[in-house]
């Protein structure tokens, strides 16, 4: 079972930056894919970005964050990151990381990101 722990959330002004981290309990090289999702109050959870596992590392982004957010991973640290820049109030949400391994989906507990105008 893969355990995921997010960190790095907080309060930031519009235009600012934050970096979220997602630490995994095992080697992320063996994980099929990882991603970041977010959920704002009253909204459904939505995809932010994904990154393929193994040696691929291919990435995918929601249109709303393209050019502002960057997903990456450090296999040596078993950690995935989300670098967020040019933040907007509409980016305010709880951000969750997930991982897929052998067709099983795992979620972290989430970290709050609040962007003030």
Image (cartoon, rainbow, N blue to C red):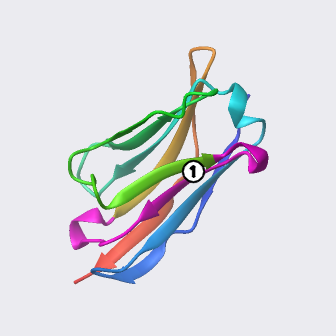
Name the residue at 28% across, 80% down: 15
Residue drawn at the location 37% of the way across and 58% of the way down: 69
Looking at this view, name the residue that lies furthest to the front.
55
Q: Quadrant of residue 53?
A: top right
From this viewpoint, is residue 73 visible? yes
Badge 1 is on which residue? 109
User: Which residue is found at the position 52% from the left and 54% from the top?
Assistant: 110
- Left or right of 44? Residue 106 is right
Residue 35, percent from left and from top: 48, 40
- In this rendering, does residue 2 appear at all? no
Report x, y in % for residue 76: 78, 46
* Residue in front for this viewpoint, 51 or 13: 51
Relative to 82, 29 lies left or right: right
Q: Nearer the viewer, residue 42 or 1?
A: 1
Tell me residue 16's x, y (percent).
36, 80
Question: Where are the magenta residues, as a range?
Answer: 74-92
Q: Is residue 43 covered in magenta?
A: no
Give the percent coordinates (x, y) of residue 29.
Answer: 70, 31
| Residue 25 horizontal side relative to residue 23, left or right | right
């Amino acid at each position: 079972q893969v355990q995921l722990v997010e960190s790095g959330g907080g309060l930031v002004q519009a235009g600012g930056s934050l970096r979220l981290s997602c630490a995994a309990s095992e080697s992320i090289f063996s994980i099929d894919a990882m991603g970041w999702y977010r959920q704002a109050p009253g909204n459904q959870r939505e995809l932010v970005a994904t990154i393929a596992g193994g040696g691929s590392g291919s990435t995918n982004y929601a249109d709303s964050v393209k050019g502002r957010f960057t997903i990456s991973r450090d296999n040596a640290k078993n950690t995935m990151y989300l670098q967020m820049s040019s933040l907007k109030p509409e980016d305010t949400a709880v951000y969750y990381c997930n991982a897929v391994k052998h067709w099983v989906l795992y979620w972290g507990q989430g970290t709050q990101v609040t962007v003030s105008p």
